[in-house]
Structures are given as C-alpha cells and as structure tokens.
C-alpha cells in the first residue's frame, strides 16, 4: 500500500498520481479539463482513456482500473454525474468499485457531485419508486450518493462545471501539503524510520494529528492493521480449507509422540503471545506524557500477527494430519485445543482499540485515565479437560 502522506512529504507535492474516477460518456469534457488541470499543477493525471494509464495486458478492464487505484494512485478524485455506468456481476459499477477500493486502502479522496443530481436526490429520497429516466440512467446512482454521504459520512463538494472542481482541488491540495509538513514536524527524529515502515494511512493520520494520547491510538491501529493481513488465513481456518496434509501418523505410539511435540509447539506460541504483550509492549509503550518507541510498537504489532499466523497454521496442520481410523476422534479433539485461542487472539487487537478509544474520550473530557496492558488470553480449561478425557478413553479402548 502506498503511504500517501509519506509520498507527498518526500516528493514535496510534485508528480503525485491523481486518479480521476467517473463515467466517461457524460463527463468526457470534464475529464479532459481535469487532465489539463492536473498537468498544469505539476502532477500526473490517471484517467483510463489516456495513454499514461497503467495497464497489465493480461488483466481485464475492471482489474486494471482497480489495480491502478490500489497500487499507483496517491490521490483519488471521484466525480459523480448523471450516469451510473455499466453494472458488474457484483451489481456495482466500475466507478463504484474504484471508490470502494480507494476507501479501503485509505488514500486521500475528494468527491464531487453534480449539483443537478443533488437537486434530484431530494425528490428521490421522498419517492424512491418514482420514474427518473429523464435524469439518470440507473436509480442506483442515487443510492451510491446516499451511501457516500449518509453511511460513509464523507465530505462531498457540489459542482456545475469543471472549473468548480479545479478551484476546489487547488485549495484542498494545498491543505494536504500543509498536513504533510505537519507530519514532518510531529514525527521529529523518527520521520525517516516511520516512512520506511509499511504502516497504513490510518496509522500515519494518527501521527499527523498527534493527539496527546496518539501513541496509544497508533498502537491500536497497527495491531489491527497487521492482524487483518492474516484475514485470509483465518478464513482458511473458519471454513476448514486444508489443501495439504503435512503429517502422516502410522500407529498409536507415534501419535502420542506427535501430540506431545505439537502440544509443546502450541504452548510456546501461547507463551510468546504473553511475553510479547507483557514484556515487549510494556518496554516500547511509554506512560502518558512519556515518548514511546513507534518502531518498537510496530515490531510488537508485526510479531503479534506472525504469532497469530503460527497459531492458525498449527491448527490447520494438526487438523489435516493423516492418522489411523481409530485415532481420528482423538486427533480432531486435540486440534480443537487452539480454536478458542484463535478467536481470542483475533479479537484482542480490536479490544485494545476499543479500550484506547475509551481512554481518549475520558482524557478529552478531563477525566483521569488509566491504561493497563493486560493479556487475558489462555487455553480453554474446559477443552483441555475434554482432551484429557478423550485420551483416557482412547487408552482404555486400545490397551
């Protein structure tokens, strides 16, 4: 993910890639004017109909558009006119999907809505079953606008002509530049190190705003960012996706030995989680008013996600182990030992974030705050007892 504020700071607002998203047919002149304006102010316009638009010839049109937003765009400009555009299989238009991609990766997004559309929107809200064919090609465009404004709660600008957009963008980009300079001042000596870390734009924005408790906010954000990178792996666990069998146990004695080794492995993962939070995190996170080590906090988040990955892999490998028929029940019960741990460790970063939000709100209201680092995650004793009972039963039946 491109860290836009960092790029702005390094490039001093020169040669940024500004992606313009809109339908082409009804807004062709606006798009031409936007391309000229972006070039005029020294940046690179990214419009799909122009020769500088990055494409992969092996990908379809939609994939190329999404890839350009995700991998190349520094700033995203959405212009909504009277056309929704062709529908994809998902029911979205390409413009809608481009917007969702920009929102997901967190790049600066500026949204412009045709003033005539906003006037029609008032009537649509009071009569959604009405006929609006003389205004729009698809009523979904109204729902798209409502989602942006009411659900996503993003700021939108009205426009009647391209000059309105360029005038607003000229001002807004100057604000963005000021924000990047503020980031430089706030990060002080850690600037270079932070920009070399793959942290999200959300984490960078926390550093820009620099709330008195920003280090706690930063911790909550990077923990979530890093564990979310393992979401596909967690889905493999949730939906029992097991492609490869790495272990083959041929008899009962070898099964006992294998279970012993796997148990030690799981114990080490669990203990490492605890040490990471109670030792490493406490070392890197300063008390309120005392500077924290931001690079160290990112190490904690990254290592936490790595341990989560090891935990899920332990479960998948254990579950997929090939054992004799009479051992399957015991093996399956043994694999369940980590299930509760996976859910707890997945939820923990979000619980930390919620705890941070509470103390930030309390601080803002002048209340006394107390942020205590706890790691209440442990093996489920009930599951452990069930496994012990299963082992006893297995031994009785096979002696």
Image (cartoon, helix red, strand yellow):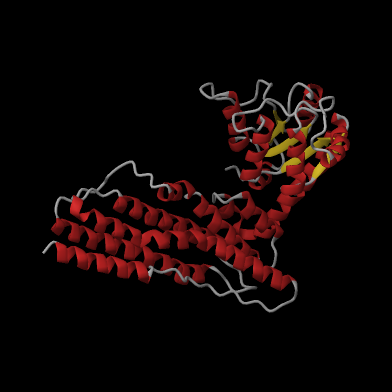
Q: Percent from the top left, x then y, of residue 240?
A: 38, 47
Residue 83 vs 78, above or below: the answer is: above
Quarter that holds the C terminus = bottom left
Looking at the image, the residue that sits furthest to the front is: 129
Q: Is residue 348 visible?
A: yes
Residue 2 vs 355, above or below: the answer is: above
How many labels were placed on the picture? 0
The answer to which image quadrant residue 189 occupies is bottom right
Q: Percent from the top left, x then y, of residue 128?
A: 80, 37
Quarter that holds the N terminus = top right
Residue name at image x 59 percent, y 63 percent: 353
> Which residue is at the front of the view, 151 or 133?
133
Q: Percent from the top left, x then y, of residue 300?
A: 48, 61
Q: Percent from the top left, x then y, of residue 223?
A: 53, 58
The answer to which image quadrant residue 288 occupies is bottom right
The answer to which image quadrant residue 245 occupies is top left
Looking at the image, the residue that sits furthest to the left is: 399
Residue 359 vs 345, above or below: the answer is: below
Residue 164 vs 181, above or below: the answer is: above
> Which residue is at the front of the view, 397 or 271?
397
Residue name at image x 71 percent, y 26 percent: 85
Residue name at image x 58 percent, y 32 percent: 67
Q: Is residue 296 visible?
A: no
Residue name at image x 44 percent, y 68 percent: 377
């Amino acid at each position: 993910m491109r860290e836009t504020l960092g790029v702005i700071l390094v490039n001093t607002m020169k040669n940024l890639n500004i992606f313009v998203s809109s339908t082409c047919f009804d807004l062709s002149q606006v798009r031409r004017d936007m391309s000229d304006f972006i070039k005029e102010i020294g940046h690179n316009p990214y419009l799909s109909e122009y020769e500088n638009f990055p494409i992969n010839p092996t990908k379809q049109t939609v994939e190329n558009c999404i890839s350009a937003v995700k991998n190349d765009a520094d700033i995203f400009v959405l212009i909504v006119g009277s056309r929704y555009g062709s529908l994809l299989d998902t029911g979205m238009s390409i413009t809608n999907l481009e917007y969702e991609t920009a929102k997901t990766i967190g790049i600066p997004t500026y949204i412009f809505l045709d003033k005539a559309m906003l006037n029609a929107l008032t009537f649509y809200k009071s009569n959604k079953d009405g006929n609006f064919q003389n205004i729009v090609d698809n009523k979904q465009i109204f729902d798209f606008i409502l989602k942006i404004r009411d659900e996503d709660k993003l700021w939108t600008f009205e426009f009647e002509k391209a000059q309105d957009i360029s005038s607003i963008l000229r001002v807004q980009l100057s604000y963005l530049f000021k924000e990047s300079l503020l980031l430089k001042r706030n990060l002080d000596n850690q600037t270079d190190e932070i920009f070399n870390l793959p942290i999200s734009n959300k984490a960078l924005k926390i550093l820009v705003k620099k709330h008195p408790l920003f280090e706690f906010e930063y911790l909550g954000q990077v923990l979530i960012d890093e564990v979310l990178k393992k979401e596909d792996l967690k889905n493999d666990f949730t939906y029992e996706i097991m492609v490869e069998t790495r272990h083959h146990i041929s008899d009962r004695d070898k099964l006992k030995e294998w279970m012993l080794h796997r148990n030690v492995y799981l114990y080490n993962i669990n203990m490492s989680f605890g040490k990471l939070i109670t030792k490493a995190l406490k070392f890197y996170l300063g008390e309120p008013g005392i500077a924290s080590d931001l690079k160290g906090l990112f190490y904690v988040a990254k290592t936490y996600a790595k341990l989560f990955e090891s935990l899920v892999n332990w479960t998948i490998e254990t579950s997929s182990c090939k054992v004799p028929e009479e051992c399957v029940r015991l093996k399956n019960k043994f694999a369940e030992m980590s299930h509760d741990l996976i859910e707890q460790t997945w939820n923990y970063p979000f619980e930390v974030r919620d705890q941070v939000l509470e103390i930030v709100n309390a601080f803002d209201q002048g209340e006394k705050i107390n942020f205590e680092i706890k790691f209440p995650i442990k093996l489920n004793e009930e599951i452990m007892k069930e496994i012990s009972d299963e082992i006893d039963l297995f031994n009785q039946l096979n002696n």
